[in-house]
Structures are given as structure tokens and as C-alpha cells.
Image: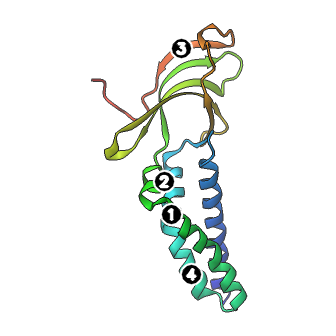
Amino acid sequence: MDTKVNISKLLNWTYCLILLLFFFDQLPHFDIKSQNLKSFVYLGLLLGTPVLLLWNYFAFTQRKQQLLGTLYPSIILIFIFVIDPLDVLFSSGSWHTQTVLYQHRTSRFEQIEFQLQDKGALGYNKRTVQVFYLTPLFTWSSPVPKNIHFAKEWKKVNLDCNELGLKEP
């Protein structure tokens, strides 16, 4: 009995963390930089929702626990089907830096980058954004300020990173 309770707690807390990271990633400026973490979050949401729903239904013996344990995975499952599971899967690609265009003169965590997002068979999304690195796993991106080449706090570097490993044509 104690093992079942511990597994239930672990599964539910892990799922809550996945949900939290998923909803943060849906914010307009917050990005998960690590492709492995982003894939874990998105696939964990797609695969973990029905697993948690079934686990909570069969693992909890009290009716109130069973109802509460199946309510939030059911709502998330409906949410997934409304926005289409394939849309969730195709948006699981992280943005990869191809070129660092400008670096901030005083903050080593802030730069302007040209980035690509791999969409699989659908090609690539492209963007140029101002990026602030919160951690190596998470970034805060915003539109590039107007007249950036005139600003004194930015230094032009044009540093090729090529995180996707694309070959030049």
C-alpha cells in the first residue's frame, strides 16, 4: 500500500512539473532552450496525461481522491484534443541559435541572435530576437529594439554558432 502511495505522489508531482513547464513555454517570451527538456515536457504531456488518468483512477480507493485525481488529467486531455495532439507535437522543437549578431557590452547573458526552429518535414521557422539567458535551459526572448546598430550598449559580433549543425549551401 505504501509503495502505491509513493508512486502516486511521484507521478502526480512529475506531471505537475511537466504542466508548469508546458504553460511557461506557452508564454510569449519564455523559451525552453534545451531540446531534451522540451521534448520531455511535450511528450510527457502527450503520453503522461492518459497514463496518469488511468493510474489515478485505479490506484486511488476513496471516491473523493479518485475524482480529484482524475479531474485535472481529464481537463488536460480535453485541452490536448481541442488544440490537436499533432500541433502540440510539432511545437516541441526548441529555438537554436545560428548566429549571434550583437552582444550586450555590460551583460554577458544578453545578446541578439538569429535563430531557427526545426519543424521536421515542415521546414524551419526563423526569427531574430533579443535573448536574455535566465539559465542554460531557459531564455527570455523579446523583439529586437529599433535602430540597434546605433545603440552604444550593443557590440556587433556576427559569431556563427550553428547549433542545428546545418551545412552551408
Judge depth for marks 2 and 1 and give the one in front.
Answer: 1
For label 3, the crowd category at 10 Å Cα-Cα, with few meaning under 14, some 14 to 19 and many 20 or more, is few
3 or 2: tag closer to the N-terminus: 2
Whether tag 3 and tag 2 are in contact, CB under 8 A, the answer is: no
The residue drawn where x is 68% and y is 9% is: 152
Location of residue 127 in the rendering, given as x and y in whole percent from the top left corner:
49, 30
Q: Is residue 22 above or below residue 140?
A: below
Which badge, 2 or 1, is on the more N-terminal residue?
2
Which percent across, then down, holds residue 130? Answer: 60, 26
**Residue to which mark 2 is pinned:** 39
Nearest the viewer among 34 and 54 is 54
Q: x, y (%) of residue 96?
A: 47, 35
Q: Amino acid at mark 2?
A: Ser
C-beta proximity under 8 Å, tags 1 and 4: no
The three-letter amino acid code for the residue at tag 4 is Trp
Tell me the residue that label 4 is attached to.
Answer: 55
- For label 1, the residue is 82
> How would you rate the neighbour count of disc 4 (Cα within 10 Å): few for under 14, some for 14-19, many for 20 or more?
some
List x then y, in percent, for residue 74: 58, 74
| Residue holding disc 3 | 157
Q: Quadrant of residue 102?
A: top right
Residue at the outermost front position: 82
Assign a secondary structure to mark 1.
helix
Tell me the kind of residue under disc 3. Val
Q: Residue at x 63, y 20 (%)?
A: 145
- Return the disc, 1 or 4, that comes first in the chain's sequence: 4
User: What crowding class fits label 2: few (fewer than 14 Cα within 10 Å), some (14-19), or many (20 or more)?
Assistant: some
Secondary structure at numbered mark 2: helix
Taking depth in this image into account, of 130 and 85 the one nearest to the observer is: 85
Q: CA distance from mark 1 to mark 4?
A: 23 Å
- Of the image marks 3 and 1, the number of the one nearer the N terminus: 1
